[in-house]
Image (cartoon, rainbow, N blue to C red):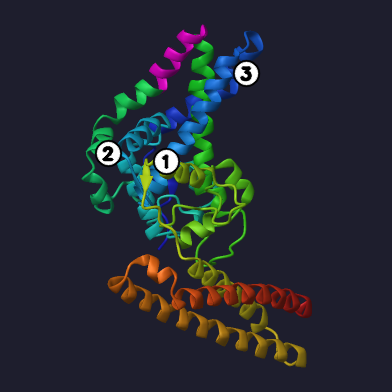
């Protein structure tokens, strides 16, 4: 179905005015005051602290905890997320999560995805909030679980006073304590808010436009290390849309993902638990399956040459090995569930089934490397 034309949708005057005014102050007044009066060290320190706190409240709290339930958090941590999330001025956690769950359910659907990337960078970045698009209306049926949380209900009910208090009261109080109320308000208040907004919006826009798709090409989500650097680890978005209930976005140890590190640290402190992780075998299975699709697409238009036919046979053989490994892995997982009902988890981890599973995982990793080499060979041959 065709998307709704922008001209026929009423303008959201409150949101448009807020974005326009804060951006104008950040672009004009903040540098003017800086050149004319300067900002003291305390102002810069609080600016950095609050930018980071707002960002992590959205990524660790609104996104990975509330929207996707990738872990459980202590009430004190949940309260901090909700308070700092209100300061980020991106609506209540209930509204934010409702929209985000619809985004995952209807990704790239130009009619139902609230910030559909197929409608362009501007729309997915900020345009979807500037008008009252039907797709942007929160569907609270998707967040019945969150409605049962008294802290989330409280934040939703009193969102406006909380947001005003955190965006005006806190910076002015910090400015009074540091001796520069206006400077603190401009830097740690307005500029902090604008940066926090657009860094978060990059997840909806840049992370669906720029980068690679190692896990799936079924949607526009991309993995990009630079976007991850800007968005507290959210730039590994292709992985996230494939495995939305993993508390990590950057799954590898070397991936820049401060959000996963913070959640893990909170777990170590006892403030978070039940951190959900996708089994490593499932991740490798997705990587190899995506590789097979790319290789098959490369070979589909090539016929006749003996070398091409040989490569097609190689791909078919590799795919058979892959399917067999997946079948065995599925059987072992089922056996593990049966075993877990009979014996303690520690006994399973010492069992031969665990050793066999590790062998399969190693074999899948080796096959992934073979497929990368084969893909490069095919690309060279086709060229």
Residue 169 falls within the magenta-colored stretch:
yes
Q: Measured from the top left, where is residue 64 in percent x and y?
A: 41, 48
**Label 3 secondary element:** helix
Confirm whether residue 25 shows in the render: no
**Label 1 secondary element:** helix
Residue highlighted by disc 1 = 129
Residue highlighted by disc 2 = 152
SS majority, magenta? helix
Residue highlighted by disc 3 = 31
- Mark 1 vs mark 2: give the one in front: 2
Q: Nearer the viewer, residue 75 or 26?
A: 75
- Mark 2 vs mark 3: give the one in front: 2
Confirm whether residue 223 shows in the render: yes
Side (left or right) of 64 relative to 285: left
Q: Badge 3 local density, few (<14 within 10 Å), some, or many (20+)?
A: some
Measured along the vertical axis of the image, is residue 248 above or below residue 150?
A: below
Q: Measured from the top left, where is residue 52 in percent x and y?
A: 51, 32
Stretch of the chain drawn in magenta: 167-180
Q: Residue visible at 38% across and 23% down?
A: 166
Q: Residue visible at 50% across and 41% down?
A: 200
Q: Badge 2 local density, few (<14 within 10 Å), some, or many (20+)?
A: many
Q: Which mark is residue 292?
A: none
Q: Measured from the top left, where is residue 150 in percent x and y?
A: 22, 38
Give the alpha-carbon distance from disc 1 to disc 2, as whole Å: 22 Å
- Mark 3 vs mark 1: give the one in front: 3
Query: Which of disc 3 and disc 2 is earlier in sequence?
Result: 3
Q: In which quadrant of the rendered image does the C terminus lie?
A: bottom right
Give the alpha-carbon distance from disc 3 to disc 1, as whole Å: 27 Å
Residue 131 falls within the magenta-colored stretch:
no
Side (left or right) of 347 relative to 52: left
């Amino acid at each position: 179905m065709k998307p709704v034309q922008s001209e026929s949708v009423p303008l959201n005057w409150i949101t448009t005015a807020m974005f326009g005014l804060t951006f104008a102050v950040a672009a004009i007044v903040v540098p003017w005051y800086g050149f004319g009066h300067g900002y003291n060290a305390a102002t810069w320190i609080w600016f950095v602290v609050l930018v980071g706190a707002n960002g992590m409240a959205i990524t660790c709290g609104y996104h990975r905890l509330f929207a996707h339930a990738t872990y459980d958090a202590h009430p004190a941590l949940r309260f901090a997320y909700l308070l700092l999330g209100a300061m980020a001025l991106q609506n209540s956690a209930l509204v934010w999560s409702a929209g985000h769950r619809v985004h995952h359910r209807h990704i790239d659907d130009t009619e139902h995805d609230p910030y559909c990337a197929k409608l362009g960078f501007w729309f997915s970045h900020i345009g979807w909030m500037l008008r009252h698009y039907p797709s942007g209306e929160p569907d609270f049926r998707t967040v019945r679980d969150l409605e049962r949380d008294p802290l989330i209900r409280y934040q939703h009910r009193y969102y406006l006073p909380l947001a005003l208090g955190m965006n005006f009261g806190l910076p002015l109080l910090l400015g009074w304590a540091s001796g520069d109320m206006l400077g603190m308000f401009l830097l740690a208040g307005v500029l902090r808010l604008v940066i926090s907004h657009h860094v978060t919006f990059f997840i909806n826009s840049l992370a669906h436009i720029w980068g690679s798709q190692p896990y799936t090409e079924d949607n526009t989500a991309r993995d990009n290390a630079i976007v991850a650097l800007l968005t507290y680890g959210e730039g590994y978005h292709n992985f996230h849309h494939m495995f939305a209930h993993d508390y990590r976005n950057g799954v590898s140890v070397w991936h820049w993902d401060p959000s996963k590190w913070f959640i893990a640290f909170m777990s170590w402190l006892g403030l978070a638990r039940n951190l959900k992780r996708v089994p490593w075998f499932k991740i490798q299975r997705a990587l190899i399956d995506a590789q097979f699709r790319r290789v098959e697409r490369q070979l589909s238009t090539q016929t006749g040459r003996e070398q091409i036919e040989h490569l097609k046979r190689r791909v078919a053989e590799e795919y058979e090995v892959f399917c067999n490994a997946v079948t065995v892995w599925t059987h072992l997982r089922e056996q593990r569930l049966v075993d877990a009902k009979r014996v303690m988890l520690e006994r399973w981890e010492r069992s031969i089934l665990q050793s066999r599973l590790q062998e399969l995982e190693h074999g899948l990793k080796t096959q992934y490397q073979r497929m990368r080499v084969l893909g490069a060979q095919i690309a060279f041959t086709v060229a």
